[in-house]
Image (cartoon, helix red, strand yellow):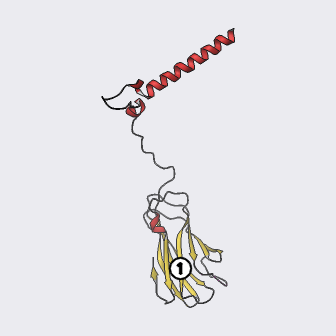
Amino acid sequence: MVLTRRARLLVSVAMATAATVSSVMWGAGKATGADSAPVPVAAVAAKPVPEYRSVAPEADISHHGHVSLWGEELGVWLLSENHGPSDVMRSTVRLRFSVVLTGRQEMPSACLQADARTVLCRTGPLRAGGAAGRQFALELQLAGRPNEVVVRIDTAWNGGVTDRNPQNDRHEVLAPATGDEYVF
């Protein structure tokens, strides 16, 4: 008998809670105007959600430079900068090529060949404000003598910062075999 009373009490409490929540959420079925539908009380009383800052610091990494193709050689001159507002401790720029790199590549010590068509370069610290960016100069040997090469430049890793302007660190450059400099 005690169990039955306790069960009945729990069911009663659950029903009363459900009825209270329902009437609070939907304004007890009261309309706000003559022809309008019920409006949830929670929607009327809701406060604006405060804007929270992202957990990661914000920075604006950019890559600019030029590409030149002559014969079997491809030159890439690159400047990586950070326009802030926060400093970046380290980042990695990725260079991808439409043709295969061949032979032994002479690259700066901060760069390595990731695969037959990709080179990765670590920038090291990049101070906010664009000052003291990191420069790279690569002269790469290509398989054959292509008429043109497409070079894709982007940030492979940004050091964990938020970059709200990724357009200035992603480029695609078509370099015909003219020996001219094609700027990005």
Q: Which residue is mark 1?
A: 150
Residue 9 vertical placement versus 127 (above, below): above
Picture quadrant of residue 130: bottom left
- Who's the residue at 49% across and 80% down the image? 174
Q: Nearer the viewer, residue 88 or 75?
A: 75
Image vertical order of residue 97 relative to residue 35, above or below: below
Q: On screen, 125 above or below 34?
A: below
Instruction: Locate the N terminus by quadrant.
Output: top right
Q: Quadrant of the C terminus?
A: bottom left
Q: How many marks?
A: 1
Q: Position of residue 56 (x, y in %)?
A: 51, 52
Frontmost residue, 163 versus 57: 163
Outermost residue on the top side: it is 1
Q: Is residue 46 left or right of residue 139?
A: left
State the image coordinates of residue 175 (x, y, percent, origin top left): 50, 83
Q: Residue 145 versus residue 3: which sits nearer the camera?
A: 3
Q: Residue at x 49, y 78 (%)?
A: 173
Q: Which residues are magenta?
A: 99-103
Point 55% across, 20% down: residue = 15
- Residue 168 is inside the magenta segment: no
Q: Position of residue 72 (x, y in %)?
A: 59, 89
Q: Main secondary structure of the magenta part?
A: loop
